[in-house]
Image: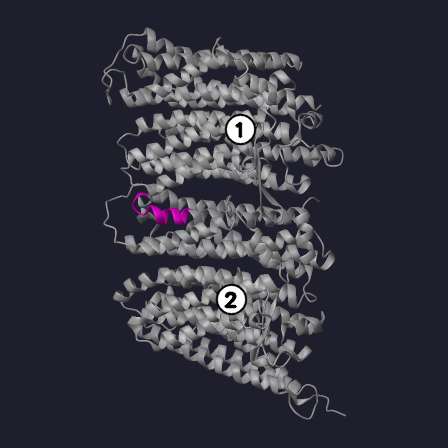
Amino acid sequence: MNGELTTLFPALTVITPITGAVVVFLLPARLRARAGLPAAGFTVAAAILLAWGVVTEGAVRHELGGWGAPLGIDLHADGLSSVFVLMTAAIGLLVSFYAKPFFALAGEKGGASELFWPLWLFLWASLNGLFLSSDLFNLYVTIEVMGLAAVALAVLSGRPPALVAGLRYLLAALGGSMAYLMGVALVYGEVSTLDLGLVSEAVEGSPAIRVAFGLMIAGLLVKTAVFPLHFWLPAAHSSAQAPVSAILSALVVKASFYLILRLWVDVFDVAVTVAAGQALGVLGSAAVIWGSYQALRQRRLKLMVAHSTVGQIGYMFLLFPLITIGYREAADAPWLAHAWTGGIYQALAHGFAKASMFLAVGVFVLAVGNDDRRSIGDLVARLPMTTFALALAGISLIGLPPSGGFVAKWMLLKATFSSGQWWWAPVILTGSFLTAGYVFMVLRQAFAPAGKPIELNPVPRTMEVTALLLGATAILIGLRAEEVLILLDVGAPFDEAVEAGEGGEP
Amino acid sequence: MTLNEWLPLIIVASSLAPGLAIFFLAENQVAARTTLNMFGAVLKLVLILVVYLGILQGNEYEFRYDIGVDLEFSLRVDLLSLLFATLSSILWVVTTIYAIGYLEGSRYRRRFFGFFSICVTASTGIALSGNMVTFFIFYEFLTLATYPLVVHRGTEEALQAGRTYLWYTIGGGTVLFVGVVWLFVLGGSMEFDRTGVLAELADEHSLQLRLLFWVLIAGLGVKAALVPLHGWLPVAMVAPAPVSALLHAVAVVKAGAFGIVRLVYDVYGIDLADLLGLLTPLAVIATITILYGSLRALVQDDLKRRLAYSTVSQLAYITLGTATLGVTASAGALVHLVHQGVMKITLFFCAGNLAETLGIHKISELNGVGRRMPLTMAAFTIAAFGMIGLPPIAGFVSKWYLGLGSLEAGHPWILAVLLTSSALNAAYFLPIVHAAWFREPDREWDVKRRARFLETPWTLLGPAVATATLSLAIGLFAITPWSPLEMARQIAETWYSER
Amino acid sequence: MTAPVESYQIYAVTAGILFSMGLAGLFLCGHFFKKIIATKILGTAVFLLFISLAKRDFVEFADPVPHAMVITGIVVAVSAGAFALALARRIWNETGRSTFEDSQ
């Protein structure tokens, strides 16, 4: 392939959804859904092109406007960013297919459904921008746009609970991004550059950098809803409409996680300490236990799924203590590849599974009229496809084989044993056990006979199929991690470790 | 890849594909569903036969596949896997026929048969697993596939049983997960090929290896229903009779027992297990289970519950034989894996027939039933005598080998356990047989089904008679070259020949 | 010879104080409007820090990059603030509430 052309792909991945958003916004409301789907399709095509470029030619860099760092802003695509762009594309496309009939029905009940498509495409653009930006300040802009679009989507229904939850979400997001920006300012004051590559060459473990890094991480932790900063998430994610909940839980929280990971391993690796890694691990563990326990206690399905997000995010943060010791003391420690793969796989598997779960619950709500756990009796017979989707997603969340969640938990557990940090193992297992508790509680209800025969509202077939496809993907990525790993390897921080890990035997 | 490499995967897929396809059929497409099921079942049997002949000629059948980093999926056929796969596929055919009759006219049969096939897929997968990771994957998959079957009826009782079942199996699975990962960290992916990776670690890590062994046994012991991890088994018998039959004979409990066999012989190796002093405590646990199960079975009035406790007890024979050093005892354990399956499935079929035809659930309602349903009760009697260990039925052969093996190994107390347990078996089975044949009928039965010539529809009667005949045949012809006993002896000899 | 305390250092310290005030306001104030003002104060603190940084190297001309960032930042902050106000007003109109406390 022409190398010149490849460098355009990162820009294309961002520009396509922005253009789509603007075009869709200018169209009259009734045509928007019809134009929104093709726009989503083009965005997916751009994402695939990008991933292909990264696989065939290695990491890709695009200098916006031809200026180049340090003055200009660069877009940089390596394996890690491509994996997240692809995940966003896959989930985004399926959620778009679900959203079309969903908002056609919801539009009849009022709310601002016609704004879904432009907002969603803007959100998509900001997600892709965040995964590809190589500039600290540009990253701030993308997280801010992402936050605004996400809140706007969350309050789309216009119902008071959603509005209140949305405002809380917005204020938390603003506080978080201001802390991040404060950190950026301090970094700029120290090293006079914003490009990630140049910053990583210039930073030292000085106190100012440590403070700056701490502020940035703290701000992003709020946005990722890590315990105890998750206070805004359950209400916001559960009061949004089903496709929006799916987007928020599956993708938006992953974006800030991605950024923490990127800063942690690629940019400020000299500033991170073992204690900081352990601290993130402790927060993650608390999230796993607390979130899963809260999920178990919920009566309303959407709240349960939202709390489950808090718990599952916790698992991703177990990555940090595991790679931090290894990265600083023994760059070729054999468990690095496991921890790294485990953390990323957790993000992927949770993305697919959680999107599927929210969409499935959305189908239940549409069919039954409410989301009380006790009102879904006998749905296993009446909505088998959606119940099956929910079951598949649940299996992956619990981490039962074969599923993406299993690969994630296997890798994390193996890394905890071989690194000697066995104290994370009880957390991983307790979390699985609690997750099994709430997943099977729902399934059990679905198997129970309905108390009184209820008339189900008809549900469009597309909605059931998309939920099932997402659930099936959460399972299928567990059957074959190899391709994801190849993509992830491009420019990975633990290159040698990954290869050493493939050798296998300790 | 050559066909030989794909064959193990095809054997697994031969029940998975029909299972998945069934979900896409409509509820009332009975003929298509039955055809699919039978096609899959027969195909699986034929393929297993092909592979068996191939193995005899020295061919190797192995399917390997990288999941990622160092997770490897591997299906490999050896004689032990063939033994278990043959058992599960033969009993699958029989049970499918039985289930078709049993569930005739009931709701949600599509779901039932779909998960039923998937359940068989899981147990075939367990049989063919080539390493510990693959074994674990299918072990957990089995839990998931059986849950919908246990709660199939959707009644409060079934849902409660499902909950108990899940807590036990998910708990066991979690413990096993820890064990398998730990094993992996110590010794790599743990292929079942007895390369003795762990034996090399014996000096350095003997404490870890001991601990790990008990972690793994705790994980496997849940499905193998070792006391005190057996609590789910008597509860889970609320499932429809074909499910109980399959659960108790091949699928779930045998997964646990098979896992213990693999663990002792193919992961640790018999020498290492002996060296670390793991065998005697395991034998003691098995003994406790045998006696406890039998004693509990004595006091049950509910027929299926009595059978369930009998399973707890009979299953521990396999563990007991595994934990006894020597070819004879190991062969006895392996052959009991097959024999217990065939006999126990007969008993559950008969219990299902009694419940479906006459509404009999309790032993106290059985008086004189032999006159009304002679064939069913004849099948029951054969299987019950087998369980007690009367010659020439299958159960006698396994007990004989176990007893002989215990003497060879120099543990005469095991023989005493076997005799006590046989006495207890007799004490809880003979009253049933006596009541059915020699007591006068003392009540009106609530007749649910009639058949024109037979005592109950042939789909219910046929399987019971067939498996009863089979348990007689494998006992009678135990010393012919194709019998399970012969296979078991060959397998056991390879284990000990490498010493 | 430079003065003991440069003016940019005064700016920077002020920025720190403002940031703490904003953070405290965001957590401690109950009223929606006060919380929104608190985010504005946070923003002002950050922008002030950027402005002060522009002069840190004692060169003759100020560093233009922080200014560019501040302008962009202000645009983002204004739109975010407008959105937050619109939400708060909508909540007031629909439910008559102005704090999170009575949300239960």
Q: Position of residue C100 (x, y in %)?
A: 41, 68
Q: Quadrant of residue A262?
A: bottom right
Q: Is residue A386 magenta?
A: yes
Q: Tell me what residue is drawn at x 40 percent, y 49 percent.
A: A390
Q: Tell me what residue is drawn at x 38 percent, y 14 percent.
A: B379
Name the main secondary structure of what is drawn in magenta.
helix
User: Can you identify the residue that label 1 sits on?
Assistant: B51
Residue A176 appears in the figure: no
Q: Tell me what residue is drawn at x 41 percent, y 59 percent.
A: A94
Q: Quadrant of the N terminus of chain C?
A: bottom right
User: Can you identify the residue that label 2 sits on?
Assistant: A223
Q: Position of residue B349 (x, y in %)?
A: 37, 22
**For the magenta stretch, what is the residue range?**
A381-391
Q: Tell me what residue is drawn at x 34 percent, y 23 percent.
A: B352
Is B358 placed above or below C91 here?
above
Going by the numbered disc 1, the residue's amino acid type is Val
Relative placement, left or right, of B125 versus B152 is right
Is B146 placed above or below A4 here?
above
Q: Is residue B414 magenta?
A: no
Determine crowd level at label 1: few under 14, some 14-19, many 20+ residues with C-alpha closer than 10 A: many
Front-most of A386 and A19? A19
| Label 2 chain ID | A
Q: Position of residue B134 (x, y in %)?
A: 56, 39
